[in-house]
Amino acid sequence: MRGHTRDFNEIMALAVAGSGTGIWDRDVVTGEIRYSDGWVEILGYRPDEVSTRVEESYDRVHPDDLAYVQATMDAHFEGRTDFYEAEYRLRCRDGGYKWVLSRGRVVSRDARGRALRMVGTTTDISSMRALAERLQQSIELITNLTNQVPGLVFQCLRAPDGTAHMPYASARIDEIYELTAEQVAVSTIPVHERVHPDDLETYRATLAAAAATLTPWHCVFRVLLPEQGLRWRQIDAHPTGLPDGGTLWYGLVVDVTARRRMEQELHALARVDHLTGLPNRRAFTEGMEQAWQMLRGGVSRGGAVLMIDIDRFKTINDRYGHAAGDAVLRHVATVLMATLRATDFTGRMGGEEFAACLPDTGLDEAGRIAERLRQAIAGTPVPFESHSIALTVSIGISKMRLADAGGDDALSRADMALYSAKENGRDRVAFATLEVERG
């Protein structure tokens, strides 16, 4: 049995010696402390180079760590902690320092509870501390990089029950949502409260679809922010399914307000005739189609369509030049806008042709409006340089009908009526014939 005990003790000694851990035994009363060979080797000393006085052991502690080590030791001596544990730096034989983890416990106290003897271990944790420092540096690097990204870089954990929070959110969350990382670390509800009510359904539907299929999530939506007001945001995120049925997202949210405004401006420009400022043919026909859909749906009682053509426009261009022709076109557009009612809309169809749609207007009223327009243009010559250019227009009128296949049908009939007005001498208003109206 004694041989077995000796073998076990030898194995334990070898295990401790190879683990980077040393043992120490302190007599608290006499101030003497004894170290194992393994403890001495951690710091690169030989056994005969290390004093057994506790004062010298404190001298080896890094000055910045000494007060912390002594306070931790005193707390255990006074019974305020169950054991002693401290991470600190010890000076080695070569003058450098190593990080160590020291643990110990008082194993003997007197009748008054004062510490008499304490035993513990010291482990070299320099490599672990270096690894931790490198990891912290990597974390700081990644954090600094993501904070420089022009947008919110985030990680979002969505539980199987649908609740979600963001374990990580970069500093730009303040710009994107006017929130803090701490607010979304608990729940993503504050984010959803920022989404524009009209876009919230689309936001949630696209998120649910991407989560169900574990496919990338892309969504462009508006937010209402306390300081910035209405802004546009774009989110792109990639999901990973978790064993418990939850989803882990990594994504980026960026401000696309300027881009959306530019797109809207470009869209508007693509629908405007740049010479006159009126809607172009595309925009006008879209408006006509909407008016016809309202008629078909019972929202509108019908309406009339005017086709307007400047008489002898080629002659004006040939006699006065194209600059004069441009001035004439702008003048007609101005008279159109001044003569038509607020509920009407107009557009340039191309060349010298214009059109107007008069919602909820019968043919009699449309005829009166067209005649006022004809007279207004005939009565206001266009000043150009030293000239005064007299103008007349021909106008064709047609009624919008439920039987039409679309808004273009009424335009076609009005165009035929316009052709009739020109054939009969120009400078006049003509209605689509009964045959055409009924057809």
Image: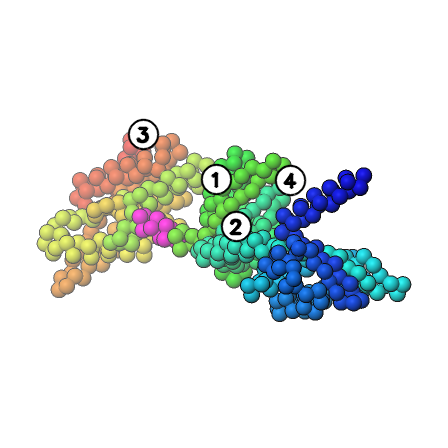
Q: Quadrant of residue 328?
A: bottom left
Secondary structure character of the magenta stretch overall: helix
Position of 206 relative to 102 (above/below):
above
Disc 3 to disc 4, C-alpha distance: 62 Å
Question: Mark on residue 161?
Answer: 4
At label 4, the amino acid type is Asp
**Magenta segment range?**
261-271
Q: Quadrant of the C terminus?
A: top left
x 22%, y 59%: residue: 380
Question: Mark on residue 154?
Answer: 2
At label 1, the amino acid type is Pro
Mark 3 or mark 1, which is nearer the start of the sequence?
1
Secondary element at tag 3: loop
At label 2, the amino acid type is Phe
Residue identifier under label 1: 216
Relative depth, front residue between 10 and 418 = 10
Mark 4 or mark 3, which is nearer the start of the sequence?
4
